[in-house]
Amino acid sequence: MVGYAALIGAVLIWALSYVVMKSATTDYPQLLFQFWRYAAVAAVYSIAFHRVIRAIPGSLWKTGLLWLGPANFVHGFFSIYAVQYTTPTRVVVINSLIIGVVPLLRWFHDRCNPARPERWAIGIALLAISLLLDPQDRSVQAGDALAFVGMLGYSYAIVLVNRMLTTDRASVIQVSYLAVMGCAVYFFAAAAIYALVRPDGFAVQALISQPMTIAGVLYMVVFVSLAANLLQVAGQRRLSPVTVSILFCLEPAVTGVLDYVLLGNAASWRLIVCGLLLIAATVIASLRYRTGDADEHALPAAGARSDSTPSVGQ
């Protein structure tokens, strides 16, 4: 129950994040918004958890900087541009495709097949997500393509976090810090290139003069990069990656509820059915723990791959 509560808390926070990003970057460069966000949260982590961070072994640093960092960077970079070309709801729906991509990456990466209840849950979740696609809209927008690439980075990050927690026996704080610091390194490099070719540089003056952008950065730092990030890793420590990805698929339903509560936009019947099906998929995916199946988080058997550095990349 702790794992489910942690992940549902993360979903509630993320349900608002795309709306915040779109509003906060209306008149501010999206790349620099993400740079300031990750620079701030990396500084907070470094100060608050310096003792735990010093204990991170070199192998984990390698995984964090060479694999987890780029995966999170791809998600953060493409998602914030995607939300400018389409609606936050469409981005969230496309992100929900992780339910199909995560098991595929786990099979390709770790040769790990989903259990039977999880396969049923994957099928139900994909059916639920298909209900959110408008059959009359057959166009593929630029924002959809950008969101799809970001979703691939999102999926790979879930797989990597699971491996670092189980095979590498890293702590929640260590994995959270490496996820943030690895992403911050790549956003710093991208922002430095941006500043070299743009006359406004890092646009510090523009940032100071826009309270909405500052509020957006603070929300992303405090609630998304700190609270939601820690909740996700804590939840993944207790649940299988497939169950985690299904819980993340609840985000479109949560977004629809918040859209109704905050903005008065009534949910469609497709959104209501999608939410109910995703809840059912989550329950079915959890059945493996009640029926005595082998735990997804068990250590690899003798002869199985247990190296800390992934063999495939983006």
Image (spheres, rainbow, N blue to C red):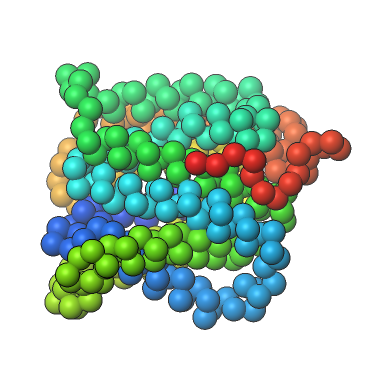
Residue furthest right as drawn: 302
Image location of residue 238, percent across then percent down: 63, 49
Q: Residue 268 sits in which quadrant?
A: top left
Q: Residue 216 sits in which quadrant?
A: bottom left
Q: Name the residue located 48 percent from the left edge and 21 percent from the top edge.
A: 123
Image location of residue 20, percent across then percent down: 24, 57
Q: Name the residue located 45 percent from the left edge and 76 percent from the top edge.
A: 43
Q: Residue 277 sits in which quadrant?
A: top left
Q: Nearer the viewer, residue 198 or 310?
A: 198
**Would residue 258 be found to the left or right of residue 10 on screen?**
left
Q: Name the residue located 49 percent from the left edge and 31 percent from the top edge.
A: 101
Q: Is residue 162 above or below residue 182?
A: above
Image location of residue 204, percent across then percent down: 23, 76
Q: Is residue 1 visible?
A: no
Residue furthest front as drawn: 197
Q: Is residue 304 visible?
A: yes
Image location of residue 114, percent across then percent down: 63, 28
**Would residue 108 be found to the left or right of residue 143 on screen?**
right
Q: Is residue 91 above or below residue 229?
A: above
Q: Name the residue located 45 percent from the left edge and 44 percent from the top edge.
A: 154
Q: Nearer the viewer, residue 55 or 126?
A: 55
Number of numbered discs: 0
